[in-house]
Image (cartoon, rainbow, N blue to C red):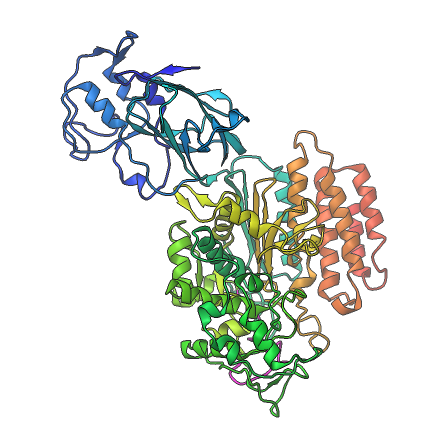
């Protein structure tokens, strides 16, 4: 519908209001006018309002407006201005200067800046938004006579807008989840340049925990599994889920400390809650270095093709020494130097630079040729183990000395060195320590107060931080080196190189967070920004989350991808475009752009004894439980997305039945086959959850299914548990 702009503001203006409940630091500082809440005559934060007649003619259309029309939703305006008549006052309500960063800045007509036979593309543009939210600034040329506006093909009443003004408009009644469109047409005069300028804000995050976007029963099953696993010996967990711009779920289970140094259960530990911090381990890579590089590339301050030596200097390759790596054919030292001289930022992000996985900079008595610690060995790359910033500086020197294992770009080898080096590059580029830069650019602007490096030094108490390894980094006494920690780690980063050699602040590990703050931080990957803050361009997001090369679809630039179903144990089997990361301590981030879904699941699964320390120092009992597998969450969530709660097909019962069978298959020798092993306890836990559901539904077919699953248990090993389960089935 074509609208003509009036010389005075009519009632429809008051429908175009500032976003209620917004929390934009810049915009929110402007006073909000609401006659029900403010005494106009005495409050000096608002402009004085002249006395007007009760009814005033609004213009040539003869529309009458009562002064009571001011009793509407708040409208943003500039304060302390004198007005001589009602028209001037209403015009001032439209004088809002666009502030902040914008998802889109569109100038109509001809928003593309050229004419095209596609005809309609100059009038229409898409933007990202979600139901129940959205805002944009609309600026009108002073010579504009009329125009039409549509959001998602719905006409927007602009009749009350006045040429020459700017309006901050709430568009939540028009928006839908995902892709939206705005259209500006019928501009008069047609040859007017910059007739209408639209600045679209980014989506925000709303509270949606009272909404059933995902079938609540899916969350009930997740809750039941984690609770039951904890009863049988699992540690603790947190889960946060964002769907369509709303935080729809957050929960926490267990205690912050499950076992002590003697491997006995702790009985007096604090309960984990949604504020508890978890050691993110390698999820740090994404939400420190990757985010920082994406930000700088988006702002044309860094390029993926920049060479490492442009930041670190010639010492990066000139200081390289000879080291023989176990299982790797030595490369010529001069050739290695040439390779290092030409390494790029992208090579590091894609783990194709040639560095070894972990050079053990913190262990003096380490030999790379045999991959062993011993008093007879000397590590030529040793930097220190005292957790000091002096050692951190020496670690950069050690990285410069580190030779490559293979020719760059010929293979992918996941290496912590890549992101340690990127940490130093970012600090050189920004002139700030990595943690300071991240706090300034991301964490503070997003009001994230539960994400930090070195939490014990930043106001957090150890008793609300989930503990990790029970005896420091000793793997229950199987590992020893000078300076090694032997106490239960709680509030100190578990990763050895991050703690001993990087003072707890590194690009590969060191971040702590709760699930909700991390979920909100990951959420910006769906649009590139948050409200009036831009972090990444759309092109940068597409570039970093696409396959780094066609033959390795499971790798993006830094990000892990599901690819061609190549990481189902983390990401399920739902979408090839899912991306995220995991952390060795038991953490998972998951982003599905196709569903506008973000999932963060955090555990401290390594706060449990080793399964068999003489056979493996990397298998912890927590990892034998479903709750420690990380990837069990998302299949249940997708079942909840596609299941109609009003017409349940009991897909969850079938999934639980499969879980029992699969758990029994996992009671193999390396995880333990005895009835007290974590793997067998995990099978008991899954059977327990299934029977809870049987008793809840009282379904005859489900009773039969349970009997079939029970028959799969070992009649000798599981005799006692079988007897207990049979009582419940009968």
Where 643 falls versus 366 (above or below)? above
**Residue 407 to residue 59: above or below:** below
Q: Is residue 495 left or right of residue 723?
A: left
Is residue 291 part of the magenta span, yes or no?
A: no
Q: Quick one: 153 or 604, which is closer to the camera?
A: 153
Residue 611: x %, y % from top left = 70, 70
Magenta-drawn segment: 467-484
In front: 139, or 377? 139
Residue 501: % across, % down: 49, 76
Name the residue at 40% across, 66% down: 433
Main secondary structure type of the part rendered in magenta: loop
Of residues 238 and 383, which is closer to you in this image? 383
Q: Which image quarter: residue 47?
A: top left
Q: Quadrant of the C terminus?
A: top right
- In the displayed structure, 179 sits above or below 601; it is above
Horizontally, residue 616 falls left or right of residue 201, namely right
Residue in the image at 68% along x and 53% along y: 550
Question: What quarter of the picture does the N terminus occupy?
Answer: top left
Give the image location of residue 696, x and y in percent: 70, 40
Above or below, comparing residue 657 to residue 189 in the picture: below
Q: Residue at left 20%, top 33%?
A: 79
Q: Residue 634: image x %, image y %?
A: 65, 47
């Amino acid at each position: 519908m074509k609208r003509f702009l009036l010389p005075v503001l009519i009632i429809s203006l008051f429908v175009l209001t500032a976003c209620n409940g917004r929390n934009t630091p810049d915009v929110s500082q402007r006073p909000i006018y609401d006659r029900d809440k403010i005494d106009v005559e005495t409050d000096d934060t608002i402009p004085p309002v002249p006395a007007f007649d009760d009814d005033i003619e609004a213009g040539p259309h003869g529309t009458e407006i009562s002064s009571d029309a001011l009793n509407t939703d708040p409208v943003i305006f500039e304060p302390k201005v004198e007005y001589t008549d009602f028209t001037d006052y209403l015009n001032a309500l439209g004088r809002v200067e666009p502030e902040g960063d914008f998802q889109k800045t569109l100038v109509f007509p001809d928003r593309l800046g050229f004419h095209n036979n596609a005809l309609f593309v100059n009038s229409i543009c898409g933007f990202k938004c979600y139901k129940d939210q959205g805002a944009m600034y609309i600026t009108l040329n002073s010579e504009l006579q009329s125009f039409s506006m549509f959001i998602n093909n719905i006409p927007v009443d602009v009749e009350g807008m006045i040429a020459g003004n700017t309006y901050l408009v709430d568009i939540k009644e028009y928006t839908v989840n995902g892709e939206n469109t705005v259209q500006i047409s019928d501009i008069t005069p047609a040859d007017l340049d910059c007739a209408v300028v639209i600045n679209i804000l980014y989506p925000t995050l709303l509270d949606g925990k009272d909404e059933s976007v995902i079938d609540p029963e899916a969350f009930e099953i997740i809750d039941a599994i984690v609770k039951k696993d904890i009863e049988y010996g699992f540690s603790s967990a947190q889960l946060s889920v964002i769907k369509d711009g709303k935080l729809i779920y957050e929960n926490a289970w267990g205690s912050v400390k499950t076992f002590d140094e003697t491997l006995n259960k702790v009985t007096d530990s604090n309960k984990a809650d949604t504020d508890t911090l978890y050691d993110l381990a390698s999820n740090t890579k994404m939400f420190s270095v990757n985010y920082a590089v994406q930000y700088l590339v988006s702002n044309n301050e860094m390029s993926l093709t920049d060479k490492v030596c442009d930041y670190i200097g010639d010492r990066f390759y000139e200081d390289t020494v000879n080291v023989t790596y176990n299982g790797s054919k030595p490369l010529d030292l001069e050739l290695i130097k040439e390779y290092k001289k030409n390494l790029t930022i992208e090579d590091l992000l894609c783990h194709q630079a040639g560095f070894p996985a972990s050079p053990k900079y913190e262990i003096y008595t380490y030999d790379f040729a045999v991959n062993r610690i011993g008093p007879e060995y000397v590590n030529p790359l040793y930097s220190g183990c005292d957790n000091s910033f002096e050692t951190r500086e020496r670690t950069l020197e050690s990285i410069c000395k580190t030779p490559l294992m293979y020719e760059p770009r010929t293979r992918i080898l996941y290496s912590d060195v890549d992101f340690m080096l990127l940490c130093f590059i970012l600090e050189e580029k920004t002139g700030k320590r990595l943690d300071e830069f991240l706090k300034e650019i991301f964490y503070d602007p997003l009001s994230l107060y539960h994400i930090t490096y070195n939490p014990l030094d930043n106001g957090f108490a150890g008793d609300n931080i989930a503990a990790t390894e029970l005896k420091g980094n000793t793997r229950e006494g199987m590992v020893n080196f000078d300076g090694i920690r032997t106490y239960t780690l709680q509030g100190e980063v578990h990763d050895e190189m991050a703690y001993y050699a990087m003072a707890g602040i590194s690009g590969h590990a060191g971040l702590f967070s709760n699930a909700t703050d991390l979920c909100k931080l990951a959420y910006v990957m769906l649009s590139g920004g948050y409200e009036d803050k831009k972090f990444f361009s759309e092109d940068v997001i597409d570039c970093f989350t696409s396959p780094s090369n066609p033959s390795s679809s499971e790798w993006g630039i830094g990000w892990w991808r599901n690819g061609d179903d190549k990481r189902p144990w983390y990401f399920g089997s739902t979408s090839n475009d899912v991306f995220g990361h995991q952390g060795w301590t038991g953490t998972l981030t998951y982003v599905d752009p196709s569903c506008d879904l973000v999932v963060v699941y955090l555990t401290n699964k390594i706060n449990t004894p080793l399964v068999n320390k003489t056979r493996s120092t990397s298998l912890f009992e927590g990892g034998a439980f479903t709750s420690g597998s990380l990837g069990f969450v998302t299949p249940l969530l997708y079942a909840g997305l596609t299941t109609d709660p009003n017409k349940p097909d009991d897909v969850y019962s079938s999934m639980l039945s499969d879980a029992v069978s699969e758990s029994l298959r996992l009671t193999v020798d390396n995880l333990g086959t005895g009835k007290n092993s974590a793997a067998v306890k995990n099978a008991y836990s899954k059977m327990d959850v299934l029977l809870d559901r049987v008793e809840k539904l009282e379904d005859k077919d489900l009773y039969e299914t349970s009997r079939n699953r029970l028959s799969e248990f070992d009649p000798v090993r599981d005799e006692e548990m079988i007897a207990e389960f049979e009582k419940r089935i009968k």
